[in-house]
Image (spheres, rainbow, N blue to C red):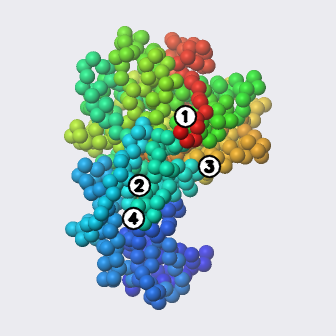
Amino acid sequence: MEMVKVTIDGIQVEVPKGSTVLEAARLANIDIPTLCYLKGINEIGACRMCVVEVKGARALQAACVYPVSDGMEIRTNTPAVREARRVNLELILSNHDRSCLTCVRNQSCELQELAQKLGVNEIRFEGESINYPVDDFSPSIVRDPNKCILCRRCVSVCRNVQGIGVIGVSERGFDTIVSPVFGMSLKDVPCIYCGQCIEACPVGALREKDDTEKVWDALNNPDLHVVVQTAPAVRVALGEEFGMEIGTIVKGKMVAALRRLGFDKVFDTDFGADLTIMEEGTELLNRIKNGGKLPLITSCSPGWVKYCEHYFPEFLDNLSTCKSPHEMVGAMIKSYYAEKNGIDPSKIFVVSVMPCTAKKFEAMRSELSATGYPDVDAVLTTRELARMIKQAGIDFVNLPDEEFDPFFGDSTGAGVIFGATGGVMEAALRTVAEIVTGRPLGNIEITEVRGLEGVKEAEVSLGDMTIKAAVAHGTANAKALLEKVKSGEKEYHFIEIMGCPGGCVNGGGQPIVKAKDRMDVDPRQVRAAAIYQEDRNLPLRKSHENPSVKRLYEEYLGYPNSHKAHQLLHTHYVPRKKYL
């Protein structure tokens, strides 16, 4: 790699040729403020917060897009630079809804942090401001244009990472706004509610639909039996909301906190993941043996399912009919659990704590009501659970570790790895391999399907059968994969697709990692590593070994894909128009 030498604030540093001034400064441990910058996604220099002086240049330059050259001299902290940054920031603040104390991003807002860092104590430019209506019509995402700073990070993520582009920039000058086409609501465009725009937003212009009051009301209702379940990705991210390192496993503290919030039972969605593998693995084998529709495509990710309904309805018959794991658990709680404990299912309130904003939409689907009642009554994101814990005054970091309640709290390592891209595929192959061959799998860690490559492929020999599999994460990667399947360029038996890049560990409801921190650490990698460590720590690592899942079939469901299992654990999907 060719290197060049540059001098930044008197410090000489050697950097790869083609680096930007911002990248070079970071190598010299010099902090240049940014606001619109999102590494590899939104590098447009729109906000001008990163301006620097470059010797020989006629004007200040945006460090995030200005390339270095050999011998370049850069100054990042001159009076002109400081004044330019302050003026730019004050202009942004002049037309910003500054209700910081009541904002969901208070103390985690990049704009707020920058104002403090640059010493902005007053707004010198108080001019006309526009008051837009807040778009809170979708079940998953709230869009508040009055807090938008026009950084375009959400636009870039939606278009360039997810390949969807349902939000964009319209109008000009002072009237510029980021919104769906024609000012429509997110509810009326083909948004998949993945929430990646929320993760990208530096302020509170995008946030999840808050269901915490709904859950508080249920917890305070003596007539309700309130049950909670938590997804595998939550336990490796929740601690971040309390100052713990990214990827810290906090399963025991999470369970303890949920009990202190007042839930009657605390269950593990990983149980539902093991149940999903039994149903989905059997469905795969049945389709292969009986000439069913192939490839079978996973249906665990509601963002991906909604994407398929909007953009690839021709693949709906390829989707597994299995409900997602938390919906399976909800259906079992309102049937088997209700019958075993003599509880009227209408009096059971099921709360799912998920890393996902799309799960809020999923829970509202009318087809997910196996007992005549919604399988799941409320979905909280990881962030919402953290807010509830803080509201209750619980000292999360110092809580003792506690265990899930038994039966629906019993799970295997296969259930845990659902949280990372490739995890569903790996879990399924662990079980399918042993069902087909009738003997233990030698190496259960199928590393070919792990990692952050956009599309991964694997071939697994099962006796006389070879399973051709593929994994995609993020809907832009899913589109590329499905186009190859449509054209006949690729043929598979089994495909796993996750709507979010990196899988559930990077879901739209996870703790937000600021853009500057993402330059040093990739939360997808660190959280996934914790997921796989949790898998290795568990005594049972294959779904079909889960004793409680076995008992559920023996006592209630009969066998995987039975008539009763189909009634309770399977569903269907519908084509959706792109615009209403």
Pointer 2: residues within 10 angstroms few (<14), some, or many (20+)?
A: many
Which amino acid lies under the numbered mark 1 shown in the image of this protein?
Answer: Cys
Q: For the image shown, how many numbered marks are present on the structure?
A: 4
Task: Tell me the quarter of the image containing the N terminus.
Answer: bottom right
Residue that numbered label 3 is attached to: 477
Q: Which mark is residue 201?
A: 2
Q: Which residue is mark 4?
A: 174
How many angstroms separate mark 2 from mark 3 (CA)?
Answer: 22 Å
- Identify the residue at horizontal 36%, vertical 46% (top origin): 134
Q: Is residue 412 above or below residue 36?
A: above
- The CA span between labels 4 and 3 is 36 Å
Foreground of the two, 316 or 349: 316
Q: Image point 33% across, 57% down: which residue?
A: 130
Between marks 4 and 2 in the image, the one whose residue lies nearer the viewer: 4
Q: Please tell me which residue lies in front, 110 or 455.
A: 110
Q: Nearer the viewer, mark 4 or mark 3?
A: 4
Chain-order first, disc 1 or disc 2: 2
The residue at 39%/15% (across/down) is: 345
Which amino acid lies under the numbered mark 2 shown in the image of this protein? Answer: Cys
Check disc 3 and give the amino acid type. Answer: Asn
Mark 4 and mark 3 residues within 8 Å of each other at the beta carbon: no
